Image: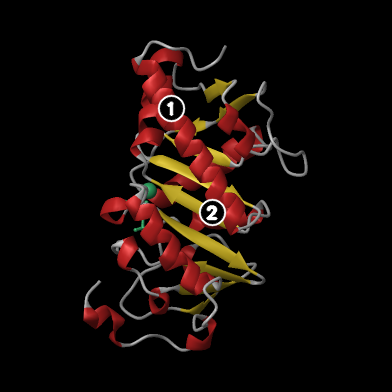
Amino acid sequence: MSSADQAVEATNDQLIQSTDPEHPANLIPELCRKFYNWGWVTGTGGGTSIRHGDHIFIAPSGVQKELMKSENIFVLQWPTAKYPAEARNYIRKPLKLNPSACTPLFLTAFEQGAGCCIHTHSQWAVLVTLLVEREKGPDACFEISTIEQIKGIPRGKGKGMLGYHDTLSIPIIDNTAFEEDLTSGLEAAMKKYPDTYAVLVRRHGIYVWGDNVAKAKTQCESLDYLFQLAVEMHKLGLPWVK
Ligand SMILES: CSC[C@@H](O)[C@@H](O)C(=O)COP(=O)(O)O
Ligand SMILES: [Zn+2]
């Protein structure tokens, strides 16, 4: 991000100024630095958004996500219109920046009661979408069973966590030319799989959400671990479901 972009920021700066490291305006840049190092948000792709009370904190679009600063963060009053984009109620808008193209997808997760939504371009997520498509067809979910880390994924809202003997299923939707256009696919997948906390996007990555930041992050980590394991198992000719 150039220094010109950071030069003048919009009003309501108090919304993003806090000495608390857990404040969303401090957490989003900190998380994105970690996500960059894990290969989740390289080359400006991917990102994360947090709902804190009646405020939604959103990163800017097209920036190096690992270099983002709290003063670059947009704040939306929640609830807000999802469409059209102009109807969204921004109460802090950094000048010379645009809000993430993932905004309507993040808002879709918040409509489901999420407190945080993470979008990654993890290569493991992309690879499992390609393997599932080749082995099972375009309408199939990613499925894996009898791996300990499955216990890191919820069974559904208020239903506890999956068990070792359960099968984890993550729906896969088709990619679109523009990030915003994924929203209807995400909404449809959430409707068809009401217990899911994640949706894979073919040849693109994944959206993972959680009731709060810690849950979204640990669920995203568990899924990424399982995707990497699945790719390695596939290379060894081992099945994902017993
Ligand atoms: C490498 S460009 C990736 C973008 O098109 C998109 O897929 C993405 O994940 C990030 O969008 P952004 O608007 O920068 O938050
Ligand atoms: Zn993306």
Kindly identify the residue that appears in the image at 53 percent across and 70 percent down. 24
- Residue in view at x 54 percent, y 31 percent: 171
Q: Residue at x 41, y 47 (%)?
A: 120
Q: Which quadrant of the figure has residue 76?
A: bottom right
Q: Secondary structure at mark 2?
A: strand
Count the marks: 2
| Marking on residue 18 | none
Marks 2 and 1, how far apart at CA: 23 Å
Please rate how many residues cluster around mark 2, counting C-alpha atoms within 10 Å: few if below 14, some from 14 to 19, many from 20.
Answer: many
Place of residue 146 in the rendered image (x, y in percent of width and height, measured from the top left): 60, 20
Disc 2 marks a residue whose amino acid type is Cys
Q: Residues within 10 Å of mark 1 (few under 14, many from 20)?
A: some
* Residue 189, percent from left and from top: 58, 36
Q: Is residue 158 visible?
A: yes
Whole-percent x, y for residue 28 in the image: 46, 65
Q: x%, y% of residue 209?
A: 57, 49
| Residue 9 falls in image quadrant | bottom left
Quadrant of residue 59 within the rendered picture:
bottom left
Residue that numbered label 2 is attached to: 117
The reply, left or right, for residue 54 in relation to residue 229 is right
- The residue pinned by badge 1 equals 229
The residue sitting at the front extreme is 148
